[in-house]
C-alpha cells in the first residue's frame, strides 16, 4: 500500500452560475471510459469510483444525476471530459479511518450499458462492457449474459476469435483493464456452431471439463463457487 495515492486519479466538476462558482475535486480510484470525439478528449464513462468529503461527493452525485460533464484524469490518462448518460446506477458508502473524526464518503456510478451486462440483462444488446479482457473472465461473462453454452476450455479460442474479427475494443481504464465486446447472442452462437463443426473447439467428456479460473482481482461468491463462476471484486 506504500505510495498508493500515486495510483489515484482525480475527478473535477465545475459549475458557474450568476450567484456563485462551484469547483469540486475528489479522488478517483476506478474508471472506465469509452473515448469519443475527433480529438479524443471526450468520452462516455461507464464506471466512476470516487471518494472525498461529504459535500464534495454529494455535489458529484448531483452532477451525475443532472448528466453533467465531468473532468477526469489519472496516471497515464490525460484530462478527459466525460458523461455517464441516462439512467446510471449510483451507490454510496462510507469508510471509517482511524484517527479521522468523520468517515470518508465513497460513490460508485456505473452506466446503463455496464449495469445491463449482468446475467440476463438486455439479451438483445449488440455490445458488452467488461472490466477485464482476461480470456476466461471474458468468455464467462459473455456466456452468462446471453445464456450461451460455453466451456472454460474455449476461452483462448473465443478471445482469438474476437481479436481476428476486430470485435473487441480496449477502453480507457484506471484500476482495471476494460474492454468493449461487439456482438449479439445470435452471432456468438453462430461462431460456436461453426467452430464445433470445424473442430476448432470440442465438447470433452464430463470428467475432463475444467473449472473456471478466477483472474487476479476477482473473487468467487458462495453460490458461484459450486458453478465455478467468477464475479467482480
Image (spheres, rainbow, N blue to C red):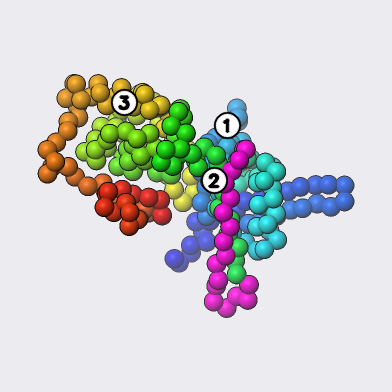
Percent position of residue 168, x then y:
40, 31
Give the farthest residue toward the right: 19
Q: Is residue 7 visible?
A: yes
Tag 2 near tag 1, CB within 8 Å: no
Q: Give the distance between the C-alpha atoms of the residues marked 2 and 1, in whole angstroms.
A: 18 Å
Start and end of the magenta stretch? 85-102
Closer to us: 226 or 154? 226
Q: Is residue 111 magenta?
A: no
Look at the picture and state if 204 lies above or below 227.
above
Say how many tags the image has: 3
Q: Which mark is residue 36?
A: 1
Closer to us: 41 or 98? 98
Percent position of residue 147, x then y:
34, 35
Percent position of residue 113, x then y:
52, 37
Write down the residue under mark 2: 110
Of labels 2 and 3, the one closer to you = 3
- 78 sits to left or right of 62: left
Tag 1 near tag 3, CB within 8 Å: no
Which tag, 2 or 3, sits closer to the chain's start?
2
Q: At 44% across and 66% down in the image, what residue appears?
A: 1
Q: At 83% across and 47% down in the image, what residue appears?
A: 17
Q: At 57% across and 31% down in the image, what residue appears?
A: 36
Write down the residue under mark 3: 189
Percent position of residue 65, x then y:
67, 46
- 16 sits to left or right of 93: right
For label 3, count other residues whose C-alpha is less than 10 Å away and answer few (under 14), some (14-19) or many (20+). Answer: some
Q: Secondary structure at mark 1?
A: strand
Q: Where does the C terminus fall, quadrant-wise? A: bottom left
Q: Main secondary structure of the magenta part?
A: loop
Amino acid at each position: 500500500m506504500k505510495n498508493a495515492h500515486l495510483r489515484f486519479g482525480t475527478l473535477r466538476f465545475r459549475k458557474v452560475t450568476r450567484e456563485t462558482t462551484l469547483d469540486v475535486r475528489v479522488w478517483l480510484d476506478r474508471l472506465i471510459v469509452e473515448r469519443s470525439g475527433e480529438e479524443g478528449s471526450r468520452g462516455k464513462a461507464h464506471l466512476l469510483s470516487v471518494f472525498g468529503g461529504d459535500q464534495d461527493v454529494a455535489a458529484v452525485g448531483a452532477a451525475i444525476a443532472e448528466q453533467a460533464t465531468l473532468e477526469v484524469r489519472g496516471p497515464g490518462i490525460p484530462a478527459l471530459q466525460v458523461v455517464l448518460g441516462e439512467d446510471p446506477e449510483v451507490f454510496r458508502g462510507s469508510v471509517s479511518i482511524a484517527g479521522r473524526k468523520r468517515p470518508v464518503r465513497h460513490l460508485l456510478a456505473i452506466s446503463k450499458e455496464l449495469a445491463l451486462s449482468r446475467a440476463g440483462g438486455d439479451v438483445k444488446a449488440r455490445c458488452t462492457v467488461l472490466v477485464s479482457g482476461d480470456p476466461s473472465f471474458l468468455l464467462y461473462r459473455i456466456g452468462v449474459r446471453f445464456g450461451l453454452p460455453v466451456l472454460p476450455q474455449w476461452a483462448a479460442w473465443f478471445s482469438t476469435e474476437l481479436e481476428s474479427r476486430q470485435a473487441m475494443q480496449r477502453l480507457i481504464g484506471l484500476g482495471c483493464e476494460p474492454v468493449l465486446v461487439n456482438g449479439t447472442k445470435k452471432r456468438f452462437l453462430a461462431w460456436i456452431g461453426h467452430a464445433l463443426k470445424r473442430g476448432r473447439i470440442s465438447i470433452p467428456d464430463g470428467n475432463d471439463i475444467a473449472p473456471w479460473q478466477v483472474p487476479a482481482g476477482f473473487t468467487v461468491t458462495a453460490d458461484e463457487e459450486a458453478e465455478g463462476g467468477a464475479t467482480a471484486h
